[in-house]
Image (cartoon, helix red, strand yellow):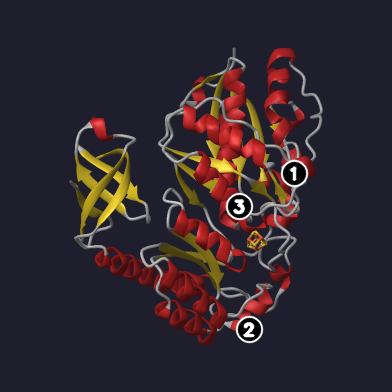
Amino acid sequence: MATIYLHCFGCKVNQFELDAIGSELITHGCIQTSDPAEADCIIINTCAVTAKAEGAARRFIGHMVRQHTQALVAVTGCCVQLTMDQLRSWPEYESGRLLLFDNYEKAGLANVLLNTIQNGSKSIPGDNDQASLTAPRIHHHTHRTRALLRIQDGCDNYCSYCVVPHLRGPSVSVPPTEIVTQARSYAAAGYREIVVTGINLGAYGADCTEKTDIAALMGELCALFPDIRFRLSSIEPRQLSTGLLKSMQQSANFMPHLHIPLQSGDNDILARMNRDYTAQWFGQMVADVRRELPHAAIGIDVLVGFPGESDAHFDTTRTLLQQIDCSYLHVFPYSQRPRTPAAGFAEQVPSSIKTKRAQVLRELSAHKRHLFYRRHHNSVRHVLIEKHRQGSMLHGYTDNYIAVELTGDDSLMNRVVPVKLEYTGAERMRAALAR
Ligand code: SF4
């Protein structure tokens, strides 16, 4: 049977989708390799959230088709969705060695590929309508400690800078029974943590036959699988409901970790981004969360250099972020994306200014992280031991997403253990097993 090589760009949803494609092929007898030179088939899931991500994906596809002429190269994802016409003009597409699958064909990619490998012809994918999204199953597990579980795809929000709704379509939820089946498979394979992912997780359930929501789903998963830690990948601020916070407080295995997009701390910019809250509301919301979950990790996404963002707008954002009690920031320079309203806005910010602003906020993020770590000096938290780092040092994350390292032997791997944390000012806290 064929040997396959998998490569992923982009977000956790992309990684889940590629894992599912790989799992399906391996279940049908394919063998996975870590060397593309050995592959009969190279499968790439791409990203287009920024111009940089799109460029990286296109360069990688070009490299694969030129360097590995022995292999079929099958490409899917947001970059394909956005630039299908251009990719179709490549000679390798003409010759049939480059296979392209848009986001709606992705669910059928494994079957098409198997057919192509066996019969040498690409058939048209069948029932791949995104409106009937089903969970591609991951049966074959790669012994990671943390598993990804995609529960939702698409988004209806149309933030003015974001190309994702144009590429992935409206929000569609995976039925709860399929989510539970996938979680059961992870539990049986011995995973100790599941990261629940989606494009817009808070929209989960609105389109299900029996109405449900993310709070109910997380409550159900935590109750059904008490030995697994559950973590949310991110949640839009307006969708961070009281019910979800309660579920996080009440379920010991629902990790106190929230990753929330702010994007800008200036109300004019927020309005032009089509974000439906004010900076003041956001600041109060985080303060409320902090009161309810004093030890939670709170990460915040922020976008710098949106069109029209002046020094004054940026200072407003920085001041708000200085005041907010969060644990870290994810900082992204704005990227002009086709099909989005913001791409046509006047006053595009020069990239040198975006780079400087991003640097300022990344320094603020490092400061926030150290404050958060220092607050936990001498406290005891539970860590999932994931892997070795440098010699015998083990590494993992606490429930509230503090990176730790500790000395220990292999018997600790993939176990959740209590540790006492020591603040050292470094990127990771030092830890020792607690009695
Ligand atoms: S919420 Fe906004 S930024 Fe997030 S995926 Fe939807 S449109 Fe894009």
| 118 left or right, relative to 243 | right
Three-letter amino acid code at the position of disc 3? Ala
Q: Secondary structure at mark 3?
A: helix
Report the number of discs: 3
Give the distance between the C-alpha atoms of the residues marked 1 and 2, in whole angstroms.
Answer: 35 Å
Residue 381: x, y in percent?
A: 29, 53
| 399 left or right, relative to 97 | left
Quarter, ligand 1: bottom right
**Does residue 197 appear anywhere in the picture?**
no
Which label was assigned to residue 216? 3
For disc 1, does the CB lie below 8 Å from ligand 1?
no
Three-letter amino acid code at the position of disc 1? Met
Give the distance between the C-alpha atoms of the residues marked 3 and 1, in whole angstroms.
Answer: 38 Å
Residue 239: x, y in percent?
A: 61, 64
Considering only order in the chain, which callout, 2 or 3, is on the residue closer to the N terminus? 3
Outermost residue toward the bottom in this view:
312
Three-letter amino acid code at the position of disc 2? Asp
Question: Nearer the observer, disc 3 or disc 1?
Answer: 3
Q: Residue at x 34, y 49 (%)?
A: 397
In the rendered view, would you say 178 is above or below 120? Answer: below
In the rendered view, would you say 34 is above or below 336? Answer: above
Q: Residue at x 55, y 75 (%)?
A: 264
Q: Which residue is mark 2?
A: 268
Q: Are marks 3 and 1 in contact (CB under 8 Å)?
A: no
Q: Residue at x 45, y 76 (%)?
A: 287
Q: Dot 2: few (<14), some (14–19), or many (≥20) neighbours within 10 Å?
A: some
